[in-house]
Image (cartoon, helix red, strand yellow):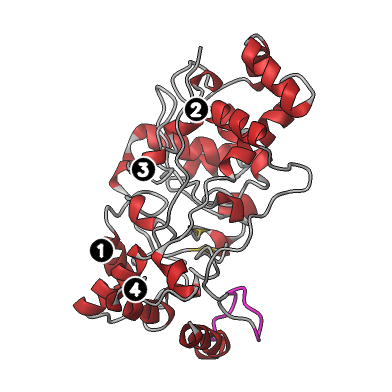
């Protein structure tokens, strides 16, 4: 462990000097945060965790009554047996519509500093209510939903017990957020290695970790205990074939319109972080996802373009795609076939244990 920490400390000093990348978001003395075990769970003071609140949040999370036609629940896009996402290129959508992005995992969402692919959402408590109202997702009128839930005696009783109030949007958001904060991965082989179990990772994974921090340059964006810098980068990812579908194009324009993009009628591609900032440097930039339990979450990228991690590694090795505005952090790597296997072995070592969640039964 001491050797690993010395290597990371060295890179934190050397990388900014070697890269000299303007606009990377690093200060002169800053560098990638050290990778290691996750810190204690961050819990907001105004939304403390209780078993009763988590149980209420779980019930809401799996309840299809939260959608306009009763066909979708939060769990429809975040399945426990599919890495708390869905193993499909694009997220499931409300009937008669199509989505334009891949579902993001809820694994370790409690540690995220920015939410959604473009970072438009703030706290989990507020973000949890967004998909419920979005016409592309659950297409529910929030005021009507509150009245529907009030009409269910079990819900009314549980909200009174947990919050001392009837069903309210604020209480719903807090309950959903409390449940989502429990979806934390622990005890990965990487974590056990970093805390002194030297046999937890294979020799190939150990070599892969050195590549991750060095030649493969992964740590430039996937750093810190949750293996994400919480920043936004244009990786040069090409458009996925599904994005040409008329319904997907409609979803792209609709989202650009509601995000107040003046040129929305002519938008043909997902603009990423630009939707939020309207700054040209953010066009096509998306949030760095965590790499923890990444083996369980194919396909990959914001548009589900790659169906395996081998494809992702090949993409980075080639220096990304030929896309305008690509980050200068993305450069050809020159990895050998054995090095790619070692890097994949390290990514496998980031797979930890997740809590067992049994969907509730509904009356």
Which residue corresponds to mark 4?
319
Q: Quick check: can you spot residue 240? A: yes
User: CB atoms at circles 1 and 2 under 8 Å apart?
Assistant: no
Residue 329 in view, yes or no: no
Residue 28 magenta: yes
> Mark 3 — residue?
82
Residue carrying label 1: 310
Closer to the N terminus: mark 1 or mark 2?
2
Span shown in magenta: 19-29
Within 10 angstroms of label 3, few (less than 14), some, or many (20 or more) residues? some
Sequence-first tag of 2 and 3: 2
- Closer to the camera in the image, 69 or 24: 69
Q: In the structure shown, which secondary structural element does the residue marked by tag 3 occupy? A: helix
**Mark 1: which secondary structure?**
helix
Of the two numbered discs 1 and 4 in the rendering, the one whose residue sits closer to the viewer: 1
Q: Position of residue 32 (x, y in %)?
A: 55, 77
Q: Nearer the viewer, residue 196 or 361?
A: 196
Sequence order check: which comes first, mark 3 or mark 1?
3
Give the residue displayed 33% in from the left and 43% down from the top. 87
- The question of residue 279 being in magenta is answered with no
Compared with 215, 320 (above or below) is above
Q: Which callout, 3 or 4, points at the residue further toward the start of the chain?
A: 3
Residue 62 numbered mark, or none = 2
Q: Nearer the viewer, mark 1 or mark 2?
A: 2
């Amino acid at each position: 462990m001491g050797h690993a920490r010395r290597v990371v400390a060295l890179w934190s000093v050397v990388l900014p000097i070697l890269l000299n990348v303007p606009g990377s978001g690093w200060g002169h003395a800053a560098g990638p945060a050290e990778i290691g075990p996750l810190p204690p769970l961050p819990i907001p003071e105004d939304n403390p965790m209780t078993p009763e609140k988590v149980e209420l949040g779980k019930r809401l999370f799996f309840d299809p009554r939260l959608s306009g036609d009763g066909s979708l629940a939060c769990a429809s896009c975040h399945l426990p047996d599919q890495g708390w996402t869905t193993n499909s290129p694009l997220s499931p959508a409300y009937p008669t519509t199509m989505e334009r992005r891949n579902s993001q995992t809820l694994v370790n969402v409690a540690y995220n500093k920015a939410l959604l692919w473009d970072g438009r959402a703030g706290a989990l408590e507020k973000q949890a209510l967004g998909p419920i109202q979005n016409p592309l997702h659950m297409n529910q009128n929030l005021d009507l939903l509150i009245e529907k839930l009030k009409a269910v005696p079990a819900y009314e009783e549980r909200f009174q017990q947990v919050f001392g109030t009837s069903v309210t949007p604020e209480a719903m958001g807090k309950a959903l957020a409390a449940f989502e904060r429990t979806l934390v991965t622990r005890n990965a082989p990487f974590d056990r290695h970093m805390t002194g179990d030297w046999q937890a990772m294979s020799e190939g994974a150990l070599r892969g970790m050195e590549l991750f921090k060095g030649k493969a340059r992964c740590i430039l964006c996937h750093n810190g205990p949750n293996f994400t810098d919480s920043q936004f980068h244009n990786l040069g990812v090409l458009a996925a074939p599904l994005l040409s579908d008329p319904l997907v194009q409609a979803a792209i324009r609709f989202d650009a319109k509601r995000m107040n993009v003046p040129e929305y009628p002519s938008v043909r591609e997902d603009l990423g972080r630009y939707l939020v900032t309207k700054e040209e440097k953010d066009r096509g930039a998306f949030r760095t996802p965590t790499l923890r339990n990444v083996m369980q979450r194919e396909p990959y990228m914001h548009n589900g373009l790659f169906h395996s991690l081998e494809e992702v590694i090949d993409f980075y090795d080639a220096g990304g795609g030929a896309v305008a505005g690509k980050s200068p952090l993305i450069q050809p790597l020159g990895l050998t076939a054995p090095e790619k296997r070692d890097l994949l072995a390290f990514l496998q070592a980031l797979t930890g244990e997740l809590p067992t969640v049994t969907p509730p039964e509904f009356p």
